[in-house]
Image (tube, rainbow, N blue to C red):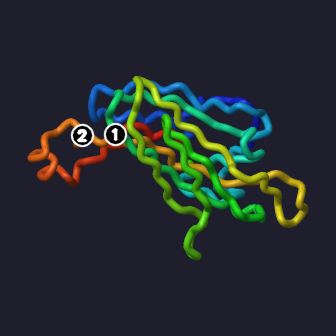
Amino acid sequence: MEEGPWMFRNTSLGVLLPTNLDEETSSLPGWIVESNRAIRYIDSDHFAVPGGKRAIELLSGKEGIISQMVETKPDKDYSLTFSLGHADDKCKEPLAVMAFAGDQAQNIHYTPNSNSTFQTANLNFTAKADRTRIAFYSIYYNTRSDDMSSLCGPVVDDVRVWFAAATSLSKFALSRLSLLIFGLLWLLL
Ligand SMILES: [Ca+2]
């Protein structure tokens, strides 16, 4: 388990899968972690993980922001999607994150159905510049219910940025291509 300021370098983390949907693809910088006690990097052998083997558990509330810059085109519409979960580590609820995409911000509470340890969330935004900041932090300062002192928090995984290709199409084309509106632009985590 890794803690502290780091960037995703290990290819096994499933970072950086730039698709070749159009010319907007290029390499991304890694996540920026602004506190060395803010993040727990969890694996599926020991925790509930929404997708794959790895995910991030956000600790320490507002002090624990993770962020990443994605390349965007000004005035184009995008959607940030991610999984919000519980690590199954006895973390005392409520769990919630604040998600940022450019000038959009939204707090999202963890309210999964009974069969799941995570839910899917999304945040739509219109890019204002060539680069857009994607960021998350935990709204609460959660601790485990068994010892009331160990830090824990919401799990974030499957972070993706989709672009709305239809914004550049005519209304006629839009009606024909409505199933193709969103294309995966970035797979971040
Ligand atoms: Ca994952």
Mark 1 residue crowding within 10 angstroms, few (<14) / some (14–19) / many (20+): many
Q: Nearer the viewer, residue 56 or 96?
A: 96
Question: Residue lying farthest left?
Answer: 172
Q: Give whichever of discs 2 and 1 has the lower sequence position.
A: 1
- Measured as percent of width and height from the top left, residue 153 is found at 72, 54
Instruction: Name the quarter where the N terminus is drawn.
Output: top right
Residue 167 is tagged as 2
Alpha carbons under labels 2 and 1: distance apart: 7 Å
* Residue 46 sits above or below residue 72 on the image: below
Q: Residue at x 71, y 31 (%)?
A: 34
Q: Are marks 2 and 1 in contact (CB under 8 Å)?
A: yes
Q: Residue at x 40, y 45 (%)?
A: 79
Give the structural element (helix, strand or loop) at label 2.
Answer: helix
- Measured as percent of width and height from the top left, residue 117 is found at 60, 66
* Dot 2 amino acid type: Thr
Q: Residue at x 27, y 31 (%)?
A: 22
Q: Quadrant of residue 161?
A: top left
- Measured as percent of width and height from the top left, residue 186 is found at 42, 37
Q: Which residue is mark 1?
A: 77
Q: Nearer the viewer, residue 98 or 91?
A: 98
Q: Nearer the viewer, residue 29 or 173?
A: 173
Q: Residue at x 82, y 57 (%)?
A: 143
